Image: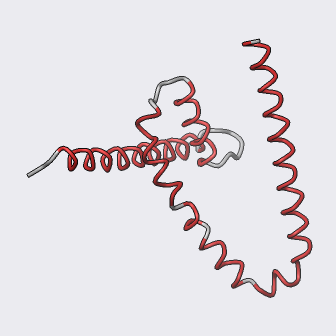
Amino acid sequence: MITSENRKTIFSIWQGIQGILILIAVYFGGEWLARFIPFPVPGSVLGLVLIFALLQFRILPLDWVDRGAIWLLAFLGLFYVPYGVGIVKSGPLVAQWGWQILIIIVVTVLSVFAFSSWMFGALKSRDNRKHG
């Protein structure tokens, strides 16, 4: 017998599956679009821009992808395991180029932090002027 609690659980699971399927479809849409753009842009990046546009212009309701995105974010750490294994297996290469790699990582992270904070400040001041 299906109780109301079971219905909520089933509906929640369906929302998660639906969200993941939509995200996968948008990803493949980005991959498909990448074939027709005359300059090299990864399909995953185009998919990200596409999902942003769909959500921003309210073509795609956030409720449709929210639960699936939460599920994927819950397992995000597992997606990095293969990269970690690859780094461990490349021990001699890391030993040879370790300092250079570390400098690149630090400069990249600091650049992203600086740009993100600058962008946040610019958008926040624009929002304050708009809603002043």
Q: How many labels does the image show?
A: 0
Q: Which residue is drawn at 56% across and 42% down?
A: 47
x, y percentage for residue 66?
Answer: 46, 41
Position above or below: 98 against 44: below
Res 61 → quadrant = top left
Image height of 107 relative to 35, above or below: below
Q: Residue 76 vs residue 132: left or right? A: left
Q: How is the image coloured?
A: secondary structure
Q: Nearer the viewer, residue 17 or 120?
A: 120
Q: Is residue 114 above or below residue 54?
A: below
> Outermost residue toward the left?
1
Q: Is residue 37 left or right of residue 105?
A: left
Q: Position of residue 120 (x, y in %)?
A: 78, 34
Locate the C terminus by quadrant.
top right
Q: In the visual, does 104 lie left or right of 77?
A: right
Q: Residue furthest bottom?
A: 92
Closest to the observer, 119 or 20? 119
Seen at 68% across and 45% down, the residue is: 41
Q: Vertical placement of 58 versus 71: above or below?
A: above
Q: In this view, does 92 lie to the left or right of 30?
A: right
- Using the rendered view, name the quadrant where residue 100 is placed: bottom right
- State the residue at coordinates (61%, 37%): 49
Task: Find residue 109 and report its horizontal and vertical position in percent.
Answer: 82, 55
Q: Which of 118 and 6 is in front in this view?
A: 6
